[in-house]
Amino acid sequence: MAAFVKAINAKIRSNPVTDYFCSTHFWGPASNFGIPLAAVLDTQKSPDLISGQMTGALTIYAFTFMRYSLAVTPKNYLLFACHFTNAGAQLTQGYRYLDYHYWGGKQRLEAAEANKATTQAVAKAAAAVPVPVAK
């Protein structure tokens, strides 16, 4: 059985494409893409859910591993792309956090919600008024 596994491994490693797809240089970044994917999807959620500390930590993490991906031999451009995407998403989240908590975003959001509620109430009241029909 060990000889069979060794023969299969030698067959996989002899082809550069399958060797790459069976390596950690591919599967590490491929599985790591969940982090930037989640961060990009979180940009559609309310900014009051953002953790400033976690966003800061993930930003540092992304920049650190962007550097690491180019420092290893061979250079891992897929890992670089993963962390580049993550850094962009985390910086966006960081801006949204600062805007909401420190730069007046919370007040703007509350004013917009109050304006929306007023508009809906006026529209509802206008719909309740009977319109005379001309004969």
Image (cartoon, rainbow, N blue to C red):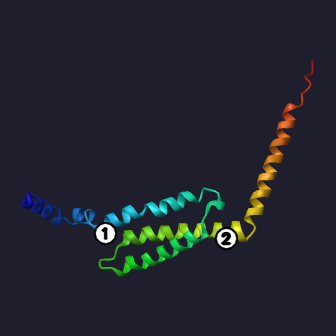
SS class of the residue under badge 1?
Answer: helix
Residue that carries the numbered disc 1 in the rendered image? 25
The residues tagged by marks 2 and 1 sit, at their Cα atoms, a distance apart of 35 Å
- Please tell me which residue is depicted at 67% across the width and 70% down the height of the picture: 98
Where is 112 relative to 129, above or below? below
Residue 56 place in picture, x, y as percent: 56, 73
Where is 120 relative to 98, above or below? above
- Please tell me which residue is depicted at 42% across the width and 62% down the height of the picture: 33
The label shown at residue 98 is 2
Q: Residue furthest top?
A: 135
Left or right: 3, with 66 as reference point: left
- Please tell me which residue is depicted at 80% across the width and 52% down the height of the picture: 114
Q: Which quarter of the figure is the C terminus placed in?
A: top right
Q: Which quarter of the figure is the N terminus placed in?
A: bottom left
Q: Nearer the viewer, residue 68 or 102?
A: 102
Q: The disc labelled 2 sits on which kind of residue?
A: Leu
Quarter of the image holding residue 3? bottom left
